[in-house]
């Protein structure tokens, strides 16, 4: 566990000293969401029903934007090789990198979401459920994304390939999360959707670090 | 004793080496030489458990390659920098030491001092020269307690003083019962070294 915290601290230090890696996805999220009212309409009756979808699609894309760099720097400078031959559990080291990714991209989006929920005229219940779905599902986005990032780590300029690999896997999360927010706005039950998101989180938490470690070993050979 | 038995390695359609067999006893220093692309790095990577051989076996005192007992005795330094530019020399070295699970009680600052980087502990690695970056990685040799050292081009970018420090460190490690395999294109003055030409 000690090495998990050490690796997490290292990744956070690197990111803090290279602020563009944190700010770029966040700025993408802020700008994209802000542009929708300008492009569609500033009417509450138009924005309110599609608000959750807008926030969910942009958060998904902004997290995807930063996934490409998840393993690339460590691959280029040889740290990944040292991780693979280290005596420590490789899935645990990968989990620390995924946690760092979620802290740096997922948490800022969760914290900003109430503000943008209000901007898109979501009611209080909608904003509350939006935050819960983001809290439950953004870690899954990082975990599933890590599988794709580890598969393409040795390939240069592979952003498009990563999107093609990962976006289909993100679709169920997108459908259930945005439908939960929409249903909450109409006062309908959302337990099923939240259970589904929690299940995806558990399954990806149990499997993604192991699948990524196998993919990384293959990429390094 | 490290025993390599009938090892073959192929990259794409290119057969790098085949039926390679040799033994390295405790205390031995093996210098691996060869032209560019002859398979020196691939051999070290296979021995480190990073690459896969086409055929053949590798044993360390009856422990098979990639077994936990084998991997615990390996210290591998590739030719990549292994440093994050946004971390200080001390932070980089601390993380690499943690990864290698070293039990030696030597202080990291002392290791940096021995390699000639006293006063550079808090310097970010993007401010260092190529030779100084190489020294940061090689400071790991003063901390590692692994038995087998696999060093890929350890003398690259080092000045004469740096080469002497590393050569004497390798010699000391092997006198204490360790063994070292290294690749280089430079001449090395390490005494009693064996040479494997690929």
Image (cartoon, coloured by chain):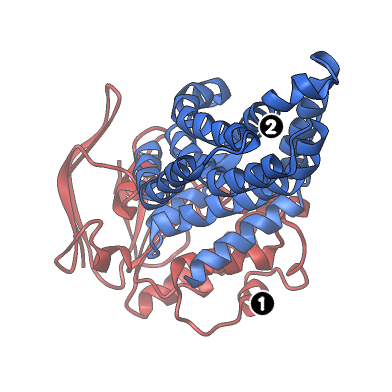
Chain colours: A blue, B red
Q: Nearer the viewer, mark 2 or mark 1?
A: 2
Quarter occupied by residue A117: top right
Is there any visible trace of residue B151 in the rendered image?
A: no
Residue at 40% in and 35% down: B35
Residue at 38% in and 61% down: A89
Is there any visible trace of residue A67 in the rendered image?
A: yes
Left or right, A39 with respect to A111, comes to right
Q: Nearer the viewer, residue A172 or B116?
A: A172
Q: Nearer the viewer, residue A76 or A183?
A: A183
Q: Position of residue B80 (x, y in %)?
A: 54, 46
Q: Secondary structure at mark 1?
A: helix
Q: Which residue is mark 2?
A: A55
**Labelled pair 2, 1 in contact (Cβ < 8 Å):** no
Q: Secondary structure at mark 2?
A: helix
Kindly give the residue lying farthest to the bottom in the view shown.
B105
Q: Compared to A203, does A119 lie above or below?
A: above
Q: Position of residue B133 (x, y in %)?
A: 66, 55
Kindly give the residue lying farthest to the top in the view shown.
A40
Q: Compared to A123, does A100 lie above or below?
A: below
Left or right, B86 with respect to A162, comes to right
Q: Position of residue A6 (x, y in %)?
A: 57, 67
If the image is split into quadrants, where does the C terminus of chain A sit?
top left
Q: Which residue is mark 1?
A: B109
Q: Position of residue A32 (x, y in %)?
A: 76, 26
Q: Nearer the viewer, residue B117 or A51?
A: A51
Quarter occupied by residue B3: bottom left
């Amino acid at each position: 566990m000690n090495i998990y915290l050490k690796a997490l601290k290292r990744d956070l230090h690197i990111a803090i000293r290279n602020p563009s890696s944190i700010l770029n996805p966040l700025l993408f999220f802020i700008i994209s969401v802000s542009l929708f009212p300008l492009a569609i309409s500033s009417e509450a009756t138009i924005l309110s029903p599609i608000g959750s979808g807008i926030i969910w699609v942009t958060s998904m894309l902004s997290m995807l934007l930063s996934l490409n760099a998840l393993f690339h720097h460590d691959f280029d400078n040889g740290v990944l090789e040292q991780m693979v031959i280290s005596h420590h559990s490789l899935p645990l080291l990968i989990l620390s990198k995924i946690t760092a990714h979620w802290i740096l991209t997922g948490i800022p989006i969760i914290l900003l979401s109430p503000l943008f929920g209000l901007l898109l005229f979501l009611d209080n219940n909608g904003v509350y459920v939006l935050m819960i779905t983001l809290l439950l599902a953004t870690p899954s986005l990082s975990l599933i994304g890590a599988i794709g990032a580890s598969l393409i780590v040795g390939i240069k300029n592979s952003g498009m390939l990563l999107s093609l690999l990962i976006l289909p896997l993100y679709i169920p999360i997108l459908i259930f999360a945005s439908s939960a927010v929409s249903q909450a706005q109409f006062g309908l039950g959302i337990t099923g959707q939240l259970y589904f998101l929690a299940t995806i989180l558990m399954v990806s938490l149990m499997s993604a670090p192991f699948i990524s470690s196998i993919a990384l070993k293959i990429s390094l050979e | 004793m490290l025993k390599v038995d009938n090892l073959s390695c192929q990259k794409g359609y290119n057969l790098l080496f085949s039926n390679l067999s040799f033994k390295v006893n405790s205390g031995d220093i093996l210098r691996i030489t060869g032209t560019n692309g002859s398979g020196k790095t691939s051999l070290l990577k296979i021995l480190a458990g990073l690459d896969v051989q086409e055929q053949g076996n590798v044993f360390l005192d009856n422990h098979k390659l990639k077994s936990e007992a084998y991997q615990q005795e390996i210290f591998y330094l590739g030719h990549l920098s292994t440093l994050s530019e946004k971390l200080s020399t001390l932070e980089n070295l601390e993380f690499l030491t943690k990864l290698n699970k070293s039990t030696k009680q030597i202080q990291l600052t002392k290791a940096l001092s021995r390699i000639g980087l006293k006063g550079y502990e808090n310097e970010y690695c993007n401010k260092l020269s190529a030779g100084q970056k190489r020294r940061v990685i090689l400071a790991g040799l003063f901390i590692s307690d692994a038995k087998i050292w696999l060093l890929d081009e350890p003398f690259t970018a080092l000045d004469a003083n740096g080469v002497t420090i590393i050569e004497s460190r390798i010699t000391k490690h092997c006198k204490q019962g360790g063994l070292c395999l290294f690749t280089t294109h430079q001449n090395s003055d390490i005494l009693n070294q064996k040479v494997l030409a690929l």
